[in-house]
Image: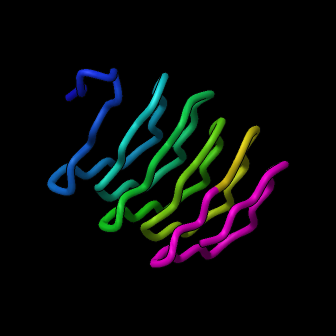
């Protein structure tokens, strides 16, 4: 599903087992067991759970990540986020 701005959304009723690749922006509210990779922006919502590594351009984390995060641009960690792994990024913002 895409919004008028071109942002893609995976709602909380969707679960993925395997690697996920996307372009542009993705608002992710679901559960993923596997790696997520993109040159774009990943926004993990409050209900998102990722069991695997994340390798993207930019990430905003509100949910839970069990894995390493490698980012080219910026990592934003919001108030309710839980991260169990290493973070590699040139910019880090913690709320």
Q: Position of residue 64 (x, y in %)?
A: 46, 70
Q: Please tell me how many numbered marks the rendered image carries.
A: 0
The answer to whether 31 appears left or right of 12 in the picture is right
Q: Out of 18 and 47, give the one closest to the viewer.
A: 47
The answer to whether 64 appears left or right of 38 in the picture is left
Quadrant housing residue 1: top left
Q: Is residue 21 above or below residue 53?
A: above
Q: Is residue 28 magenta?
A: no
Quadrant housing residue 49: bottom left
Q: Position of residue 52 (x, y in %)?
A: 54, 57
Q: Position of residue 10 (x, y in %)?
A: 26, 43
Q: Is residue 84 above or below residue 30?
A: below
Q: Out of 50 and 45, give the one closest to the viewer.
A: 45
The answer to whether 28 appears left or right of 54 in the picture is left
> Which residue is depicted at the point 24% across and 21% down?
4
Q: Quadrant of the C terminus?
A: bottom right
Q: Position of residue 86 (x, y in %)?
A: 75, 67
Q: What residue range appears in magenta? A: 76-95
Q: Out of 23 and 3, give the one closest to the viewer.
A: 3
């Amino acid at each position: 599903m895409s919004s008028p701005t071109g942002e893609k959304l995976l709602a909380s009723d969707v679960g993925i087992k395997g690697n996920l690749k996307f372009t542009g922006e993705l608002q992710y509210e679901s559960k993923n067991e596997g790696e997520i990779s993109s040159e774009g922006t990943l926004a993990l919502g409050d209900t998102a759970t990722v069991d695997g590594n994340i390798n993207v351009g930019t990430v905003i984390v509100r949910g839970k990540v069990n894995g390493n995060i490698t980012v080219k641009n910026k990592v934003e960690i919001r108030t309710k986020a839980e991260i169990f792994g290493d973070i590699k990024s040139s910019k880090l913002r913690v709320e």
